[in-house]
Image (cartoon, rainbow, N blue to C red):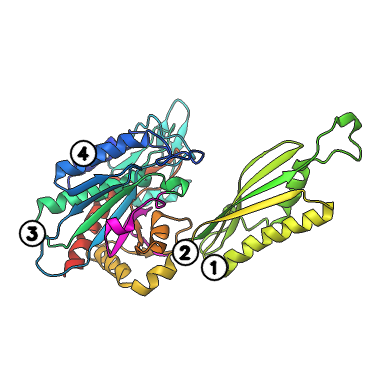
Amino acid sequence: MISKAHIIKRFNSYVTIDTESDPNSKTTPSTEKQWNLANKLVEELKAIGMQDVTIDANAYIMATLPSNVNHDVPTIGFISHFDTSPDFTGANVKPQIIDNYDGKDIVLNEEENIVLSPDYFEDLLQYKGQTLITTDGTTLLGADDKAGICEIVSAMEYLIKHPEIKHGKIRIGFTPDEEIGRGAHKFDVEKFGADWAYTMDGSQIGELEYENFNAAGAVVKVKGKIVHPGYAKGKMVNSMYIATEFINSLPRLETPEHTDGYQGFFHLHNIEGDVEETKLHYIIRDHDKEHFEARKEVMVKLTNELNTQYGKEVIITEIKDQYYNMREKIEPVMHIVAIAEEAMKQLDIKPLIKAIRGGTDGSQLSYMGLPCPNIFAGGHNFHGRYEYVPVESIIKATQVICKIAELTAK
């Protein structure tokens, strides 16, 4: 039996350590403070009895739970990341415990009138009667992906204490900087040495994912010309107006707030500019590879059209691919998804197999030779003040890890 109190204590010990990553940093990890949790995890893994515990110069952690069977079993892995998103502050997290949730509004912060309400977040109602961990409304929680780390550590601890559960060799890995798209960049797949792995980085209970977006980032630089506005006729070129033309020329309904399921989008997530220069920062997403390539071509074609219209190069668009849909790498080894699905069913969890509207370390790792589907970690409303996680979901995810290990050994 996995202790709820033990899970809460472990999870809270992780989320109260600030590990926010920084996309503007060139180092790995991108922030020095990520070492604080990384070093703690190394000591904790040693303390519970894991073997071959290592941490490299970039804070990538790996450890081994040796096989306890005599026959050949594939080596499997479980992976999570310890950084949190720079979208919202992760400093001074004060987790709140809501016992026996009654299905009503949860006041996160009375002073600032911040309320987590099922009227807006309907998923809350499926956890009525359970124990929730929330924020105090001023920070994110960090369940993405410290819930995943808690689950992996707790599962390894449980397997060590219960040798009657038979399993093969298990490798675990914890990475920095996943939230800024660099979590897998320096992951040593050969050193990890697993036949396949699972990232514990999904959301609600039951999620099992082996498809994700193809992803690219685009920087659109618009050049203008500044002169005194009183004498600007025929001379001034306002880059912000040209940038507005570019924005309005892209399909308005193909944006995150108007799409779901397998629908892709263009997402303008940052603008910085003045008369002389404006920069537009986009992300481009689509599950379908052909549609993904077409979206990039739309931006290139629009750039060329506006440059022709103005008779000179006023726009430079730079597009860089970020990651690809892992489905291509998972489909040849679908038995690894089937094992996770069966593990959930044996634990009375309804598998929710769907495409990720995002990416995980697993998508990059799959292309690096380590097939890596994604399993729920249990949290909701990631990257913001309304983030929460049911403790029962963390426990269930921990049980799924143990069951996968058991099924793989049979």
Whether tag 2 and tag 3 are in contact, CB under 8 A, the answer is: no
Residue matched to label 1: 289
Residue matched to label 2: 325
Q: CA distance from mark 4 to mark 1?
A: 43 Å
Whether tag 1 and tag 2 are in contact, CB under 8 A, the answer is: yes
Density class for disc 2 (Cα within 10 Å; few <14, some 14-19, many ≥20) is many
Q: CA distance from mark 2 to mark 4?
A: 35 Å
Q: Nearer the viewer, residue 77 or 257?
A: 77
Q: Disc 3 residue type?
A: Glu
Which residue is painted at 76% across and 37% down in the image? 276
> In front of the other: label 2 or label 3?
2
Asked if residue 200 is among those painted magenta in the image, a careful observer would answer yes
Q: Is residue 34 left or right of residue 303?
A: left
In the image, residue 366 sits, relative to residue 16, either above or below, namely below
Q: Disc 4 residue type?
A: Glu
Residue matched to label 3: 164
Which residue is painted at 60% across and 65% down in the image? 293
Residue matched to label 4: 43
Residue 149 visible in the current orientation: yes
Name which of mark 2 and mark 3 comes first in the sequence: 3
Name which of mark 1 and mark 2 comes first in the sequence: 1
User: What is the residue that sits farthest to the top in this orientation?
Assistant: 111
In the image, residue 125 sits, relative to residue 209, either above or below, namely above
What segment carries the magenta color? Answer: 183-212
In the image, residue 223 sits, relative to residue 301, either above or below, namely above
